[in-house]
Image (cartoon, grey):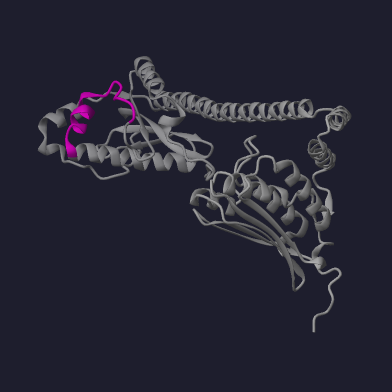
């Protein structure tokens, strides 16, 4: 008995080209003189009639007669697939037909129907009742009497031949389908490998560019030292002070970004940054730093405040002619420090604010884009403290921006009354 397969559902027209099936039918009909047709699993023809006897042609042209033929074909197909072998039967009009099942991967796809003859062995019973009474159709009755007779063994041999050919073609078609799927999978794999290689190549290129972009620290510091000495010779103490501050910031920046520093050290870097920045700051811009002494030992990732301050200055205050103020504050709370950077500048557009809140701002190579610094700070603090770290961002166009970081810290607190 044929096994059913639920892995794939195929249609005969998908497995093998119908044109090829038609060529098989035509060659078979010419070689044997028998009529033949290929039907799907419902008994519906998918090829044209081959060598059909005039009786069957005229009968199938009649709606009732055609329905009876298709019913016989469907029933015979079911019997053939039940045994997995060609099934010989007497149709509803008494002619002998043979149904050869087309089975692929255990699935019945259709059948090759051949026959429309009388055979010498008249022991077969009709599988369905006649659709019409020939006595009511004299012309059909006459054509029915003209249907030829053939030996049974010859008829069965023809049926086995068409069964073998049809299933061979179907199996070849099945192999072709699977091969196409394998080819598609291979192509997809090749595309994925190429994409991976391109990504690795881009990453390697980016790493090389980053290496090339890193100027030798010794050269940088030697250059700054030369500028500092020249400032002394030119009696420019302010320039010397700025060069010194720049050297300190560079010295820190050459260290690993995952380094942890105390809040007190971070504030020192802020002072160095402001010393360099002051030549570009308007006289109307004020920077206030208000840190409770109990918070100075708080450990945070290096450069956690500087990007927030830079965003406030560049995007919030510097574009305003009237200037404004930015305040950096840190106060202790129960088991944590509330670190805040607040300005009364231009504020952020709603779209920018939404992106930062969702941490969707992508690095684009422009370190002055609002939100990149904030996103980096948030990600590093979240990595350091997991879910214990919390943050808030509030901003309104024309009113300013406030970012608040709630950083876990339970070291060195005195118990409050």
- Give the number of callouts: 0
The image quadrant of residue 382 is bottom right
Residue 59 colored in magenta in the image: yes
Lateral position of residue 321 relative to residue 190, left or right: left
Q: Which of 183 and 71 is in front in this view?
A: 183
Residue closest to the far front: 235
Q: Which of 153 and 25 is in front in this view?
A: 25
Q: Which of 241 and 143 is in front in this view?
A: 241
Residue 382 colored in magenta in the image: no
162 over 257 or under it: above or below: above
Q: Is residue 100 visible?
A: no
| Residue at image coords 37%, 24% | 151
Q: Give the range drawn in magenta.
A: 46-63
Lateral position of residue 300 relative to residue 185, left or right: right
Residue 202 coordinates in the image, percent (x, y): 69, 27
Lateral position of residue 299 relative to residue 288, left or right: right
275 over 38 or under it: above or below: below
The image quadrant of residue 229 is top right
| Residue at image coords 63%, 26% | 190
Q: Nearer the viewer, residue 295 or 8?
A: 295
Residue 16 coordinates in the image, percent (x, y): 45, 26
Q: Can residue 182 be seen in this view?
A: yes
Q: Quadrant of the C terminus?
A: bottom right
Lateral position of residue 268 relative to residue 405, left or right: right
Residue 319 coordinates in the image, percent (x, y): 55, 44
Residue closest to the far bottom: 417
Residue 51 coordinates in the image, percent (x, y): 29, 20
């Amino acid at each position: 008995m044929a096994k059913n397969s639920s892995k794939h559902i195929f249609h005969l027209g998908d497995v093998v080209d119908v044109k090829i099936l038609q060529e098989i039918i035509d060659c078979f009909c010419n070689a044997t003189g028998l009529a033949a047709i290929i039907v799907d699993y419902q008994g519906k023809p998918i090829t044209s009639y081959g060598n059909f006897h005039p009786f069957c042609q005229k009968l199938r042209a009649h709606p009732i007669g055609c329905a009876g033929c298709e019913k016989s074909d469907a029933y015979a197909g079911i019997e053939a697939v039940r045994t997995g072998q060609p099934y010989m039967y007497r149709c509803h009009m008494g002619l002998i037909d043979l149904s050869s099942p087309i089975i692929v991967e255990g699935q019945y796809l259709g059948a090759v129907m051949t026959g429309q003859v009388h055979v010498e062995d008249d022991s077969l019973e009709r599988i369905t009742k006649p659709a019409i009474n020939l006595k009511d159709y004299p012309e059909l009755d006459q054509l029915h009497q003209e249907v030829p007779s053939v030996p049974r063994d010859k008829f069965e041999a023809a049926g086995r031949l068409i069964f073998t050919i049809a299933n061979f073609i179907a199996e070849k078609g099945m192999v072709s389908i699977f091969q196409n799927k394998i080819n598609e999978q291979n192509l997809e794999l090749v595309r994925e490998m190429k994409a991976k290689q391109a990504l690795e190549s881009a990453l390697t290129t980016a790493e090389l560019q980053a290496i090339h972009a890193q100027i030798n620290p010794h050269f940088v510091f030697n250059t700054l030292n030369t500028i500092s000495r020249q400032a002394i010779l030119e009696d420019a103490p302010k320039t010397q002070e700025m060069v010194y501050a720049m050297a300190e910031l560079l010295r820190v920046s050459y260290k690993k970004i995952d380094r942890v520093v105390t809040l007190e050290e971070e504030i020192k870097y802020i002072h160095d940054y402001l010393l360099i920045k002051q030549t570009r700051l308007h006289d109307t811009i004020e920077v206030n730093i208000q840190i409770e002494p109990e918070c100075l030992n708080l450990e945070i990732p290096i450069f956690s405040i500087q990007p927030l301050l830079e965003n406030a200055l560049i995007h919030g205050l510097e574009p305003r002619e009237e200037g404004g103020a930015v305040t950096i504050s840190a106060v202790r709370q129960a088991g944590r420090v509330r670190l805040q950077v607040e300005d009364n500048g231009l504020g952020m557009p709603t779209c920018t604010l939404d992106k930062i809140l969702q941490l969707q701002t992508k690095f684009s190579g422009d370190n002055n884009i609002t939100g990149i610094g904030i996103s980096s700070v948030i990600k590093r603090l979240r990595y350091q403290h997991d879910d214990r770290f919390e943050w808030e961002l509030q901003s309104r166009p024309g009113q300013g921006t406030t970012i608040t970081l709630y950083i876990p810290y339970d070291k060195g607190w005195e118990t409050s009354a």
